[in-house]
Image: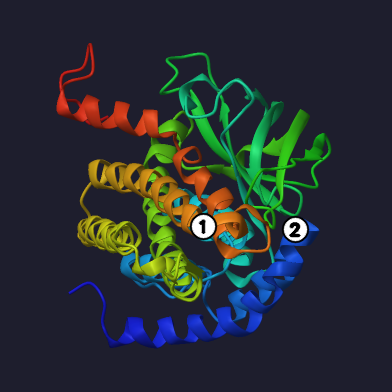
Amino acid sequence: MLFTADHDDIRRSLQKFIANEINPHVDDWEKADIFPAHELFKKMGSLGFLGLNKPVEFGGSGLDYSYALMMAEELGAITCGGVPMAIGVQTDMATPALARFGSDEVRREFLSPSISGDYVACIGVSEPGAGSDVASIKTSARSDGDDYLITGGKLWITNGTQADWICLLANTGDGPVHRNKSLICVPMKSKGVTVARKLDKMGMRSSDTAQIFFDNVRVPKRNRIGEEGQGFTYQMIQFQEERLWGAAACLKAHEYIINETIEYTRNRKAFGKSILDNQVVHFKLAEMQTEVELLRALIYRAAEQLVAGEDVTRLATMAKLKAGRLGRELTDACLQYWGGMGFTNETPVSRAYRDSRLTSIGGGADEVMLMVLCKMMGTLPGSKGNAS
């Protein structure tokens, strides 16, 4: 059994926090194209939400991954996609490798304040010419004595305009592309770091997304996470949690839109009966609810294996792929049943339609997920079923 009474206690506290501290402000944050990350994260950190499965010695609760997954699922009850995504970056995208492989010194400097909510974190992998193709990044960290000098740029960086530090993937050598990269904790106030612009996005409006440049940014080598040259491997491991988080955060969000659509179509009349009374509508909604439950079962299975210490690359990849595809199908179908109101920005279904589209892109596009799966199956040209 994945969840226990202890999980339920934290779940209820998180539900109360979302209802009182987040959802009443979502509409304002969406209009402002940003939410107050430091203010919100400090509140969450004070309640222990930002370090459920992080080490106790650095301020976390020391619980297993199932608690982080439970939190990801509950964040889907936030009535937009941007805020939960920003929280997920803090807890499951920018900090897992640091928590697992970082030295005590670098964890005290960057992980502890991220768990307490005093720091906002972001993850710097994607670049203008390297999104899902992580191996092709160009940002470099050149050795200079006890320091690195970092030059390059990152794009599509969630939390980028508010972050205190970035978990940066950079080339630290000239060897093979899978063994020449390192993850480095870079303070955003370092000389040479420039937040060039905040991106104007189709969805996820309340989440700030930045383009960032690095011009000979000097960072001590002690800020490196783990071994030099192992950054690609660390990031691939970190992706397991990121992709599971992305899938889990969709579950309650999808159910919310299904329920809102049921309510709207039950009350909306056309040709003498409610829209919901049409078989094509209630059958489709039943089918979508079934798909959500199937996705939940896949995610829970992956989480159980992760807690057991197993490699969940295959299942996490499947869950991420399915969550993105389902989000596109579900929100498109529901928006259609809202008719003209679905095409306005004042309805929850239109926000969900815009926000959910990112799931098939961020953290590895659908096509990359399929490549990973085909490689593991031995069906990708040139592959032999290698899971690496």
Give the side of residue 75 with respect to residue 307, left or right.
right
Residues at marks 2 and 1, CA–CA distance in whole angstroms: 33 Å
Give the side of residue 290 with respect to residue 161, left or right.
left
Q: Nearer the viewer, residue 244 or 276?
A: 276
Q: Is residue 192 above or below residue 112?
A: above
Taking the image as drawn, is residue 330 in sight?
yes
Instruction: Give residue 198's position: percent from left, percent from top.
Output: 78, 43
Q: Is residue 152 above or below residue 256?
A: above
Give the side of residue 69 with respect to residue 352, left or right.
left
Residue 104: which disc?
1
The quarter of the image holding the N terminus is bottom left
Q: Which residue is mark 2?
A: 34
Q: Is residue 152 above or below residue 16?
A: above
Q: Amino acid at mark 2?
A: Ile
Circle 1: is it few (<14), some (14-19), or many (20+) Cα within 10 Å? few
Instruction: Give residue 13's position: percent from left, percent from top.
Output: 48, 86
Name the residue furthest top. Answer: 382
Q: Quadrant of residue 167?
A: top right
Circle 2: is it few (<14), some (14-19), or many (20+) Cα within 10 Å? many
- State if disc 1 and disc 2 touch (CB < 8 Å): no
Residue at x 23%, y 58% (from the top left corner) = 294
Instruction: Give residue 3's position: percent from left, percent from top.
Output: 26, 77
Residue at x 34%, y 34% (from the top left corner) = 369
Identify the element where label 1 is drawn: helix
Q: Give the label, 2 or 1, closer to the camera.
A: 2
Q: Quadrant of residue 388?
A: top left
